Each structure stands twice: as C-alpha cells, then as structure tokens.
Image: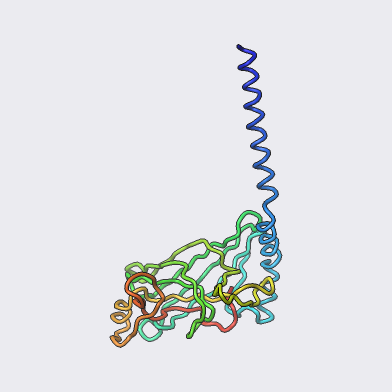
Amino acid sequence: MRQKTFTRRIILIGMILAALLLTTLVVAHPGGASSTARQIRSQSFQPKTLQQMIAEHQLASTVQVLSSQPPSVIIQFPLFPSGLKKTFPKATGVVTIVQGNPAVSLFETVTVDVANMPPDTTFTIFFIEKAVKPFGHAEYVADLHTRDDGHGDISFQTITLVAFAMDAANPGTSQDQSGLASGVQLEHLGMWFSSMQDAQKILNDTTLKGTPFDGGNPPLHAGPQAMTDGQDAPVF
C-alpha cells in the first residue's frame, strides 16, 4: 500500500514538473505570430529611432522622447484647445505613451492629463487619422471626466503605436513606423464633448449640431471636438 502511495506521489510530482517546464518553454518561446509582432515593435520603437524620426519631420516637433529604462520607451506630446479655444483658452493637456517590454506585452499604457477645462464634464477620447476636421478614420479609446477644478486624467492600455482602422471590404494599405501596413494609420489624438447639451451650455452656442463621437442612443448626441494634438505630422 505504501509502495503504491509512494509511486503515485512520484507520478504526481513528475506531472507537476513537466507542466512547469512546458509553461517555461511557452513563455520563453511564444507563438510565431506574436513573436514576429514583438520583434517588429522592438526594432521599430527605440528612443534613437523616434528621435531621428522627429529630426526628419516624420513625427511632429511637439513630440518628446523621455528618458526611460530600456527596453521601455516613453513619448509625450501636448494637447491644445480646439472647440474650447474661445471659452477656455488656457485649457491644456498632455499625453504620455509608455511602451513596456515588447517581449511580454503588445500594448501601450496611455495617460491623458488635462487642466483648466470645463468642470464636471465628460469627454470622449479618440485615436484619429487627422488632428482636425474632417478627422478621417477614428477609434474610440476612453472617457475622461473632469473634476470640479477643471482638472482630469485617465489611463488606459491599448495598442497605440501601430493603431489603425480599415474597411474590411476595402482595407487598403498605408505606411506606419514598421513599413507598409494594412488599413489607415491612426496617429493623432482628439477629445470631444460626450454630450451635445453640455457643449451647447458650456460654449454658449445653441446652434451646435451633434457629432458621432460618442456611442449609444440617440445617434449624433456628442458635441464638437474640444482638444487636439493639432499637428499635421503624426504624434505617435
């Protein structure tokens, strides 16, 4: 009886060790598609590469590459008031994008900080094809609600440095930092009033029309763009 119990324990321990070994191999050697994606991102988004792109005007001059511990990469750029310009001319914003270790993560952490904004107001954040009208393709990524003092911040995680949009029936191609890619690159960021009623009240303009920059019912219930990076060249 003891011999059988001992044998079972040996088998169980062997199974556990085998499982641990398999897990180690999977982590150390990810699948082909993921490995390729990590390799592309690791090669494309190094600080020196990004700094060179800024010098060559491939990225906007407002973009800064911050000091970071390799292999992390941190870039930052400001936001400027667009629809808010007349009523809140001192509104400011800064976007910080952190790419961690590409070997273990395929997405970035994005933090948006704003100040001197309308208080107690919700804004939607989109990655967009163009910084100003007609904006082009867009992708909703987050909401930001300001506090009573007009300050607000939000952090979220999503694929950012290679964000793109497409029509699956006609995907097309475009250039991104890694070369020729599918779809249309989303390389700008904008913020919109989540509510048209809020926008009309804050901007003191009842003639404002609704926009599609917020989901839900009814359609076109969002207000105009409030903040933008305002650049012709990409910011990420």
Name the colouring of the figure: rainbow
150 lies left or right of 105: left
In the visual, does 67 lie left or right of 197? right
Looking at the rendering, in which quadrant would you find the N terminus?
top right
Residue 166 seen by the camera: no
Q: Nearer the viewer, residue 48 or 90?
A: 48
The furthest residue to the front = 169
Q: Is residue 27 above or below residue 197?
A: above
Q: Is residue 2 visible?
A: yes
Q: Position of residue 195 (x, y in %)?
A: 33, 75
Q: For the view shown, which residue lies furthest in the top direction?
A: 1
Give the residue drawn at x 45%, y 76%.
92
Instruction: Please identify the quarter of the rendering in which residue 167 is found.
Output: bottom right
Vertical position of residue 209 compared to residue 236: above or below: below
* Residue toward you, 231 or 152: 231
Write the residue at 69% across / 64% down. 40
- Residue shown at the point (51%, 76%) measured from the top left: 128
Q: Position of residue 97 (x, y in %)?
A: 56, 66
The C terminus lies in which quarter of the figure?
Answer: bottom right
Residue lying at the far bottom of the rendered structure: 207
Name the side, left or right, on which 150 lies relative to 59. Answer: left
- Horizontal side of 200 relative to 162 (left or right) equals left
Residue 6, relative to residue 67: is it above or below? above
Kindly identify the residue that appears in the image at 49 percent across and 62 percent down: 156
- Measured from the top left, where is residue 129 in percent x and y? 54, 78
Query: Residue 76, relative to residue 204: is it above or below?
Result: above
Residue 210: x, y in percent?
Answer: 35, 81
